[in-house]
Amino acid sequence: MKEKYQSILFATLTLGSLTPAMAQQAWMSPEVGVAWSQGYLGQGVRINMIDDFGASCDRIYGRCHGAWTTWQAQSVAPLASVITHEQGGGVVGLITASLNVFNLSYGLYSPLASSASEVALVGYAQSGRAVVVKSAGNNGIPVGAAVPSGEYRGRIDNLAVSLAGQPSAILVGALSKNGTTTSPASMASYSNVAGTSPVVQRNFLVVGVDSSALGGLAGTSFAAPIVSGYAAIVGSKFTTANAAAVANQLLNTARTDTVSGYNAATYGRGEASLTRALAPASIR
């Protein structure tokens, strides 16, 4: 079930401690620091990280895949309540006291019906009860296309396909860096793209994954928790907004002028912009 990640080895790991600190990281968009200065740090929002944390997990630099994705989400939204759940550990319920966000940095290549936890997650996105953020995949293909080689050759990511078009789902691709109007970003070579389906394009966002600033980490697995953190920050401003409103605020305010040669089949809605998402006085 786990989506393959990309990693580039460096002689010196630059991430240091995995203890989240409220400090602007080099891999973050500068917009994160602006949001913090305005008092929006994810407070009152719950981020559920569903990933590998157990003894047999995929390890990168000696740490579980889930440790890195969790560190990212907590670093972006330092006052959010970030809860870890072992992938395949059963259905994770919702809490009613706050906005619920789920981060899914993995793929599902068996039928959706075979996993009660993924059926529940798609249900949350379908009913608009939780923001469900899903990594797009690392095969350099359109979402929903068959994997061309490797362990899952000829199979599709049924979780991505099932989340496409749902009211509070976001599929996340990776740019090679954070884009600006003067230095637009391109899609990372490994990242899946939106493809020609308008249904997928509607739910597809991209963010920068700067492997040099992330100590060699690269992959859409590490794009998704950035967007999960953004969702928590937006939720900490718009405290009465439901999950569908928060997801759509991020999708509707994405930038197309900070990516190179924008087209919806590659970039979907465009690059997520936290500043634009936070700009209005209220959202519906």
Image (spheres, rainbow, N blue to C red):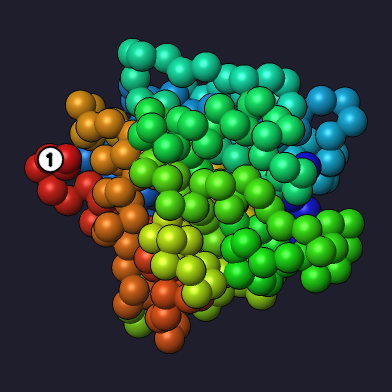
Name the image quarter holding residue 182: bottom left
> At 22% across and 40% down in the image, what residue appears?
38
Q: Is residue 198 left or right of residue 66?
A: left
Q: Quick check: 173 above or below 184?
A: above
Name the image quarter holding residue 118: top right
> At 55% across and 61% down in the image, what residue appears?
173
Callout 1, which amino acid?
Ser
- Badge 1: few (under 14), some or many (20 or more) residues near its Cα, within 10 Å? few
Looking at the image, the residue that sits furthest to the bottom is 261
Q: Quick check: 204 above or below 43?
A: below
Front residue (pair 206, 119): 119
Q: Quadrant of the C terminus?
A: top left
Front residue (pair 131, 226): 131
Q: SS at mark 1?
A: loop
Q: Is residue 126 left or right of residue 11?
A: left
Q: Quick check: 233 above or below 8?
A: above
Residue 186 in the image, given as x and y percentages of width and height: 52, 78
Front residue (pair 176, 194): 194
Q: Is residue 112 left or right of residue 175?
A: right
Residue 74 in the image, given as x and y percentages of width and height: 51, 33
Q: Quick check: 154 above or below 69?
A: below
Looking at the image, the residue that sits furthest to the left is 281
All told, the count of numbered labels is 1
Q: Quadrant of the N terminus?
A: top right
Residue 47 in the image, given as x and y percentages of width and height: 48, 29
Q: Is residue 74 left or right of residue 128?
A: right
> At 60% across and 40% down in the image, what residue appears?
104
Q: Is residue 280 visible?
A: yes
> At 17% across and 51% down in the image, what residue appears?
279
Q: Is residue 25 visible?
A: no
**Which residue, given by chain and number where applicable, does mark 1 sit on?**
282
